[in-house]
Each structure stands twice: as C-alpha cells, then as structure tokens.
Image: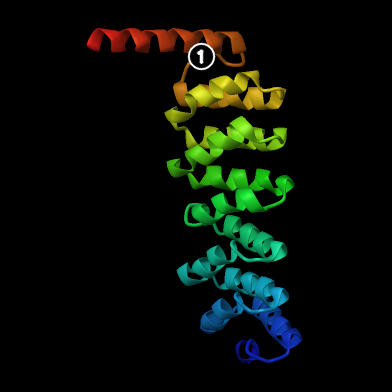
Amino acid sequence: LCADRLSDPDAGVRRAAARGLQRTPTPGALPALAKASRDVDAGVRAASIGALERIGGSAAGEAIVAALKDRDSEVRQAAFDTAVRMNLQRRALPALLGMLAQDDPLRKREILSAIGDAGDRSALPALLKVLKDDPDAGARQAAAIALLKLKDPGSTEALIRALDDPSRWVQAYAMRALTVITREPHGEDRGAWKRWWGERRTAVSKAACRTS
C-alpha cells in the first residue's frame, strides 16, 4: 500500500509513504523507491533514501549513489551519510570527488574522509590539490589523513612540502602519512624527514645521470 502511494499526486502523501517504508522495509517496493528518489519534492527524495537503505542491495545502492548528485543539499547529505553507512565509498567515488567543489567547506572534511576510505588511487590528484591549495586548514588535515589511508608513494613529495604547512595538525598528519607510506623511522622529526627527502632526491638524480 505504501509503495502505491509513492505515486500519489500529493507530495505530503508521497513523503508519508516513503517514511512508512523506512519503518517497514519492503523489498518489492524497491523500484518505486528508486523512482521516488528522483521525485520533484526534496522531502520525498530524502525519505526514499532512508527506505532504500533499509532494503539494501546493489540496486538500492545505485539509487543512493545517484542521489549524491541531487540539486538539494539536504538530499545530498542524506545520500552521503547513507552511502558511508553502507560502505559505498568506492562505488560513489566520482560523485564524492564532485562534491568537493559544490558542498559547504565545513562538510568537506567528511567527504575527504570518505574519499580516503574508498582506497582508490584515482583520487590522488584531487587529494593532493586540497592538501596544497585549500584555504581551510581542516580540509588540508583531512586530505593528509586521506592520503595516509591511501598509502600511495606518489604522495610523498606533497607530504614533505606539507611539513611547512602553517597548521601543526597538517604537519603532524603529513608525518604520520609519510611514516606509513615510506616505513622510514623519522616519526615527528620534521628536520629528519626533510634531510631524508633531500638525500633521496640527490641519490635519484645521481642514478639518473649514470644511466643517461
């Protein structure tokens, strides 16, 4: 009955139907909920996301990931929170990267954390850009933590540069990321990290000259 009411002309009825399906998950209602997640009414879309989470499964996940691009910020946030709870970060990565540009800077830290949890090195350029250029120290810190999770050696030089960040927290997480990525024993000694990097670059340069 609730699934049938998702197509009612009254938005209030559709919202109530979606909330009812949150309380009583009905797998047979999944197609109707997926359609309702694109409803003209933002309240219906948000409530449908909650009901889709209760049903679960690949098709529900697809609709939730699509809602990350919703035009309404509250619907996007509902979809984001749901995607994280359902461990959809890797599947949602393209949408999450898009959210970095359009969402409130205060929410960017959560998005960066989810991007790190995705564990996909295709996110590396975006994370490096935030670490280098974002005016918000909290976002730069979150980018450093995401790079720690990613464990990609391609971030080493950027993390070394982050040791000169104005925020001591960004510096601290950059050193933690460097420890995980390089397995070097320099801990929280910024000077030791810089000396190590200088020596490494010199050795690479000399090796290149010998082979040229």
Q: Camera-side residue: 76 or 179?
A: 76
Decide if residue 2 is in sight here. Answer: yes
**As drawn, which residue projects farthest toward the front?**
212
Residue 73: percent from the left, percent from the top?
70, 61
Point out residue 162 in the picture as x, y percentages from the top left corner: 60, 23
Between 21 and 11, the one lying in front of the other is 11
Q: Quadrant of the C terminus?
A: top left
Q: Could you tell me if residue 27 is visible in this image?
A: no
For image coordinates 60% across by 57% down, the residue present is 85
* Position above or below: 190 against 54: above
The way the protein has been coloured in the rendering is: rainbow
Looking at the image, residue 114 lies above or below residue 197? below
Q: Residue at x 65, y 80 (%)?
A: 21
> Residue pushed farthest left?
211
Q: Quadrant of residue 122?
A: top left
Find disc 1 in the rendering and name its residue: 185
The answer to which image quadrant residue 135 occupies is: top right
In this picture, residue 9 sits left or right of residue 147: right
Q: Position of residue 101 (x, y in %)?
A: 62, 49
**Residue at screen point 54% across, 56% down:** 95
Please count the marks in the image.
1
Figure check: 130 above or below 206: below
Q: Secondary structure at mark 1?
A: loop
Residue 123 location, x and y as percent?
49, 43
In the figure, residue 2 lies in which quadrant? Answer: bottom right
The kind of residue tagged 1 is: Pro
